[in-house]
Image (tube, helix red, strand yellow):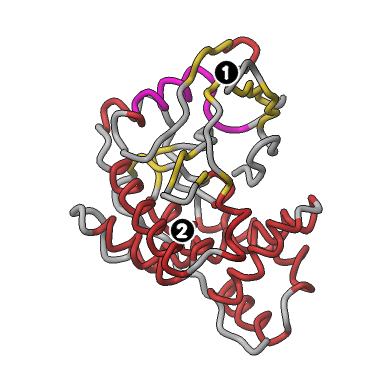
Amino acid sequence: MSPGGLGGLDHEVTPGRADTVVRRRRPGADGLDVASEAALLALVRTTTPVPVPWVLGTWPAQGVMELERVGGTPLLDLLPALPPAAAVRLGSELGGHIAALALAPRARVERLVPVDLPLLGDLLAEAADAWAQARHLVPLGRRRSVEAFLRSIPDLHPADPVLTHQDLGAEHVLVDDVGITGIIDWSDAALGDPAVDLGLVLRDLGPAAGERAMVRFTGSGLGDPGLRERALVHARLRALEDLAYGLGAGRSTYRDNALRALARLFPGDG
């Protein structure tokens, strides 16, 4: 997972020619290689109505690709002042996008992306590490709720994996006054649990928007009985992850968004 947006943990991004950016994989970065990601973006463009960047050139040996510059503002920067109605509208749009990805042809997708269904033990270890770093930022009453959750996370049993972005946080969703102008950073895409992407909508946009995304997704004939519970689990886990990342990297936007999310996702006084 790479909570970094432009210049994040996995990539270095610099301006290219007019209206383009050049993205270089950092040494040892996880995720898709350049050729696979470029092929995936070409497939995604035919699958979802939500815009994704055009790939203008790739240099696989150097881990470099040139992409069109996507207009709009990162949603993460707008969240503190985002009107509730706008959040719900974006949640609906994202739910439709997540559903469209899930309906992508499996035979084409599995040639491009890995299966990513992490074990519960691995998720718990990552969450415990994040919590140890950042628990002091959370009010005492809410701390008890978080720690009760970490002691009792149910095992996660998704249905068959489908195409998912896997890092659909607000930093990777670009918007303008009308709606979503683009979704970027597809290097973590995988055949995985759509509850991860739905959980990130819930984390960043709140329960009303998360519910609208869920309704759009299940309204496409998708989902399984445990989907809603898993989405909540992933929303909570990724809020803890972003809180620790924001603290450790000195990125107050991530830290503050995670604290707002934790206040919505965990009951507690304070």
Residue that label 2 marks = 201
- Between residues 226 and 92, which one lies in front from this camera angle? 92
Q: Amino acid at mark 2?
A: Val
Q: Amino acid at mark 1?
A: Glu
Answer above or below: position of 125 versus 13. below
- Which residue: 32% across, 41% down? 101
Residue 90, percent from left and from top:
41, 56
Residue 214, percent from left and from top:
33, 62
**In this image, 122 relative to 55: left or right?**
right
- Which residue: 79% across, 73% down? 136
Answer above or below: position of 237 versus 260. above
Q: Quadrant of the N terminus?
A: top right
User: What's the magenta region?
Assistant: 30-43
For label 2, the crowd category at 10 Å Cα-Cα, with few meaning under 14, some 14 to 19 and many 20 or more, is: many
Dominant SS type (magenta): helix
Element marked by disc 2? helix
| Quadrant housing residue 8 | top right
Q: Quadrant of the C terminus?
A: bottom right
Residue 250, percent from left and from top:
81, 53
Q: Is residue 38 magenta?
A: yes
- Between residues 66 and 146, which one lies in front from this camera angle? 66
